[in-house]
Image (cartoon, grey):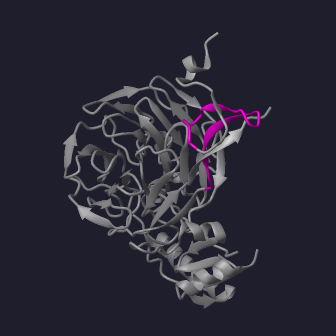
Amino acid sequence: MDYKYSVKENWGKTSSDQFIKHEDRVKFHIEGHPGNVWVTEDNVHGGQWIARHSAVAKTKSQAQTIVTDIIDAAKDTWDNDNVDGESSAEKITRLGPKPTDITLP
Amino acid sequence: MAKYKAIHGFTVQNRTADTDPLNIGQVYYRSDTGDMKVTLNVLGAGSWASGGAINTARFWFGGAGTQTAGLVFGGANPPRDQTETYNGTAWSEVAELNTERGYTNGGGTQTAAICVAGTVPPYGTNVETWNGAGWTEVADVSTARSGVNLAGTSTSLITTGGFNPSYPSGNAPYAEEWNGASWAEVAEMNTARYAGGGSGVSATDALIFGGSNTGGGALTSSNNEIWNGTSWTSLADLNTGRYGVGGFGTTGAAICCGGANPVITNTEQWNGSTWTEVNDLSTANRTQAVSSQPAGTSQGFAAGGSNATATLAVTEEWTQPQAVTNTTITD
């Protein structure tokens, strides 16, 4: 499957529209990543979704860089957020697991 | 031998068309074609779509109600008391919890909900019930813990497991039933864990799936157990073990969505005997608040939560279309 990459903030839902509709999910693959990066299936419906939202098109490399920079910053934040006497289990419970790399499809 | 009418309450009709809908499950005879047919409620493929964003981004908090009449409360991090209601489009802030808490869980409806335990900090026993206008402190659970698994309503609920580092591997194994006024200790799950998903309609009809059976979520569980009011029975496991999952539905039809570790989008559907991978969340998410009023798998919501890098405010709405069809019975 081929993909397109774009950036757009998820604005959720209004009384008349949705950022992602059920019809969208039926017609094409879409997945969201840190940095408001969206990966959409490269078909006519995915292209229409990008146009409908005026999402900013990115190359795969550009999109990957956005995601990786955010993940790297989150890793540093996670490493530096410590509480005296806290076990590793308690830290994971408090913060969640340490962020892991994401490789865009 | 009992007749069909005695068993089902209606007769096998002779019909010459499929037009008028019959009772779900009713068998009839097409005299013009010679076919035996049955009226079925057929479920289509479910999917997640965007919902309105909650006003306060947070994770590990309680959820109740439905996709068009929802409720969320509490959350981390830091411990929160905010409560919000959902009308199917937008979230509105309403009266706050009496005790701020994260890593909590809850259930019920938009007008009759319950919030159970959580991190105050440290680990709390506090329980509060919601009447549609405000929260009231009620009887506490016996054991302080966070991330409890639970299923049921504000007047009939079971809570089990939870995290507290004073227990081996952080798992507080206790199970307690709530009858609307007090808690009673009952049999523990076969596999102690916390932060699993739950579905079911009462304190005696509950399903608990996933979770973590090692402190901090280092190891995730795919275990799935059903509670009948007396004992826990292990059923088919989730395909993907995870903790911090969202779960809603009944013991015969449930949805398990998201979770960690790592944070995932995976959604699985339970049909009473097996879990099947279905359409995923659009964004990876764990420890979100989910709907809880049992409506099978036809609809639900997952709000807030966290992914690998941020605390989230997004809501996703699950809808599974249903259609009544008349199907020819074959060998």
Q: Nearer the viewer, residue B283 or B183?
A: B283
**Residue at figure coordinates x 23%, y 36% from the top left:** B139
Q: Quadrant of the C terminus of chain B?
A: top right
Report x, y in % for residue B120: 29, 53
Query: In this rendering, would B138 be left or right of B40?
Result: left
**Residue at figure coordinates x 41%, y 61% from the top left:** B59
Report x, y in % for residue A57: 61, 89
Up-down relation of residue B204 to residue B220 (above or below): above
Q: Nearer the viewer, residue B181 or B27?
A: B27
Whether the magenta-drawn stretch holds residue B33 is answered as: yes
Provide the residue span drawn in magenta. Answer: B20-45
Q: Nearer the viewer, residue B69 or B26?
A: B26
Q: Quadrant of the N terminus of chain B?
A: top right
Report x, y in % for residue B214: 54, 46
Q: Quadrant of residue A69?
A: bottom right
Up-down relation of residue B268 to residue A38 (above or below): above
In this view, the residue farthest toward the top is: B1
**Residue at figure coordinates x 37%, y 32% from the top left:** B176
Q: Quadrant of residue A51?
A: bottom right
Tell me if I can see residue B56 in this picture: yes
In this view, the residue farthest toward the right is: B331
